[in-house]
Amino acid sequence: MQRIQLGRSDLHVTPICLGTMTFGEQVDEPTAHDILDHAVARGVDFLDTAEMYAVPARKETYGATETILGNWFAKNPGLRQKLTLATKVAGPSRGMPWVREGGGMTAADIVASCEGSLRRLQTDVIDLYQIHWPERNVPAFGTMYYDPTKERTQTSIHEQLDALAGLVKAGKVRYIGLSNETPYGVHEFVRLAEQHDLPRVATVQNVYCLLSRALENGLDETMHRLNVSLLAYSPLGFGLLTGKYDASGTEGPDAPKDGRIARYESVRKQRWGRPEALVAARRYNQLARDHGMTPARLALAFCYTKWQVASTIIGVTTKAQLDEDLDAWGTTLSPELLAEIDRIRWEMRDPAN
């Protein structure tokens, strides 16, 4: 895998990033360390985490993923310097008071969260520090429409950038990024950074998969023109695009209990649990089989080969899953197959947006 540059930064990473939100919930620490060892052995040099992980979020597992990573770095002296490490500051609470009290995300919150992440990760610097979701009101995590009556902003984007600039100046953060953002948000962060000589966002981490392609309707142009790189998360649609739920559905006695959607009621209540998402996933999964490949290979190749994507974030619970995801690299999709994918999208649209 040829390494790619993130935005205008000097971060050069593999086009596959290991996401770690399962560590500390579905994956215990010894297994997580084995997966990390295997990922590095196979050439992955980009890791992504967040202060609120593990997922599904619970008070008992808040910060667990970063702690697991920090212990792994401590076991492997010198390895931290060879890897690009990304983590995130949580946005407004979203029903998680153990992450942050109150409804906002102040400059002081950003600094305190960064300090906490540095301690748990047992590192002096975070390579890419991302705002996990916007401080202002936006349609995210499956919300369909923007509602101006729900505006809640307490800290301006300029104030957020000032706080992040202080962390960069102190040497605690190298570059900054966004997540679950909109075209407006990306434009504002870049405009204010350039106007006030503040850090410029290098990346946006948003959902992107066969079931959720909304960013192709505006955000992709924004990122292309502003030279901000996309980190695509959930390329397998929380498992819907592996085919594991095709026969059983996402709940009931026959649903795979190791799957996140079947295992957690909270996940079934989200966009991945929508009946329409499963119907569309079955269509894409059958298309993959009709073309002689596994559903996962088709879904991953779709992300791996799209011009919009800089690096695809994969989440796994076993080394076997990691190998399957990495082995899909290099798969090409014919123009005819891509046209069939688009025909399904035209009919089904984006049920997991």
Image (spheres, rainbow, N blue to C red):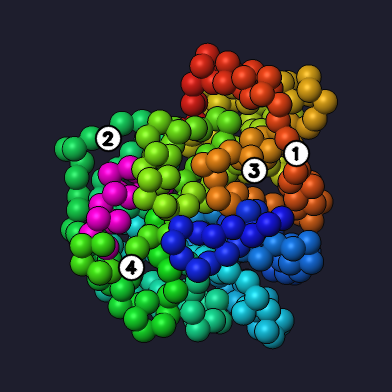
Find residue 146 and name its label: 2
Task: Determine contact: label 3, label 1, CB under 8 Å.
Answer: yes
Where residue 272 appears, x then y in whole percent? Answer: 54, 34
Label 3: few (<14), some (14–19) or many (≥20) C-alpha neighbours in 10 Å: many
* Upstream in sequence: badge 2 or badge 3: 2
Measured in 3D between alpha carbons, the distance from the residue under mark 2 to the one under mark 3, in whole angstroms, is 30 Å
Amino acid tagged 1: Thr
In primary-sequence order, the first of circles 3 and 4 is: 4
Question: Which numbered disc, 3 or 1, marks the residue that appears first in the sequence?
Answer: 3
Query: Where is residue 23 shown, x and y percent of the image?
Result: 63, 61
Return the disc, 4 or 2, that comes first in the chain's sequence.
2
Question: What type is the residue that disc 2 sits on?
Answer: Tyr
- Say few, some or many: other residues with alpha carbon within 10 Å of mark 2 (under 14 / 14 to 19 / 20 or more): few
Q: Which residues are magenta?
A: 180-193
CB of mark 3 within 8 Å of CB of mark 4? no
Q: Quadrant of the N terminus?
A: bottom right
Q: Secondary structure at mark 3?
A: helix
Is the C-beta separation of discs 2 and 1 under 8 Å? no
Which is nearer the N-term, disc 1 or disc 4?
Answer: 4
Q: Nearer the viewer, residue 12 or 237?
A: 12
Callout 2: SS: loop
Residue drawn 37% across and 50% down? 226
- Which mark identifies residue 36? none
Mark 4, residue position = 199
